Image: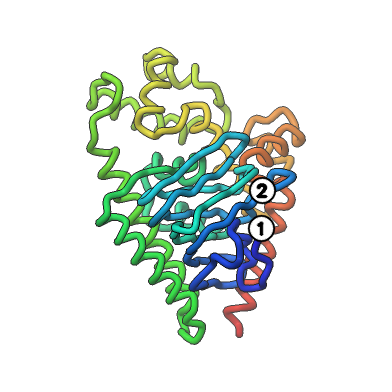
Amino acid sequence: MKEIRQKSARPAVLFGQKCVKNIGYIDDYIFACEIEGGDHISYSKPRRPKYHLVILVLEGVLRIIINGKEYSFGKNTYVNLPVWADIYEIEYASDFKALVTATDKTVIEDIFRNRNPFPPDFRLRMGHSFGGEIFSEKDAQTLKSDVRNLILSLNNKDHYFAEELNYSYFYILLTDMADMMWRRYGKGEPSHNIDMKRSESILKEFFSLLQKHIKEETELDFYAEQLCVSKKYLSMIVKEKTRVPAGKVISALRAELAAEMLRDPDLSIQQIALRLSFSDQSSFGKFFRKHAGISPLKYRQSLRKTLLTLRSSRSE
């Protein structure tokens, strides 16, 4: 029972090497593979994935202990493992089949920031939930095709626009997943007895307020007061529509904004902490580490390394 250590699998996909098939990768930025067979991997200390993992379970059951809690994912479900997930144990039987993508977190951040804007609830699920959505057989086939096309693209090293193709195929995978979730939740009836039009209007206004006040207002009470609803009612709507607690929504968006500001070399970490209304740089550092898995300084350094590597690959 061991992790993959070969160079072609540097994104540290948390599966036994004997089960990994059909690998495609581009350095440390995008990685995809198929998993077949069983294994049981246990860690003496919790491990955090260095890369953002999306696992599509095709057959069998994946049992995984995340942040001290056990989860089981069966056929036609997706497992989302952000970089802040603490993994204690992972187990899958001999009948297990899955498709896996692993990306540097800056890849998803870049897509969410610069390409077609995804719905806030999808962005939150990708960054702050462990997945578990059950897709239809038709949807599963679509996602299977997306990942396999990505693997083929990643292995096509001779294409002049290989980098653009790889990003495009990964983008297609994300858009298909977003579409499936929208069809599943965007049109569906809520599990609580909430007026749909009213709740959707409040949620839209809530996110609009977040865009305006996220730097200085961190408490849900403020947004509830602005919307003239109770904190409890707003919490219920946000959880119903996004599947993420309202407090996590606020923290997630502040973490996204912090990451975006860290990309600006003209802003010091101290300036960013002040602009986001943290009492000091230390408090900001603890907040960012909790959500991103690394310190603001290391995050900024990783961006520089990524940029230099991309420039180097383009000049070759």
Residue 245: x and y in percent read 47, 28
Front residue of 291 and 203:
291
Quadrant location of the N terminus in the rendered image: bottom right
Q: Residue at x 41, y 65 (%)?
A: 147
Q: Residue at x 47, y 53 (%)?
A: 113
Which element is circle 1 on? loop
Quadrant location of the C terminus in the rendered image: bottom right
* Residue tagged 1: 1
Please indicate whether residue 80 sits to the left or right of residue 284 in the image: left
Label 2: few (<14), some or many (≥20) within 10 Å? some
Q: Measure how far apart labels 1 and 2 are at the Cα level.
A: 8 Å
Residue 133: x and y in percent read 37, 43
Is 184 situated above or below 305?
Answer: above
Residue 42 - label: 2
Whether the residues at callouts 1 and 2 have beta carbons within 8 Å, the answer is: yes
Q: Which residue ends up furthest to the front in the rendered image?
A: 94
> Upstream in the sequence, badge 1 or badge 2?
1
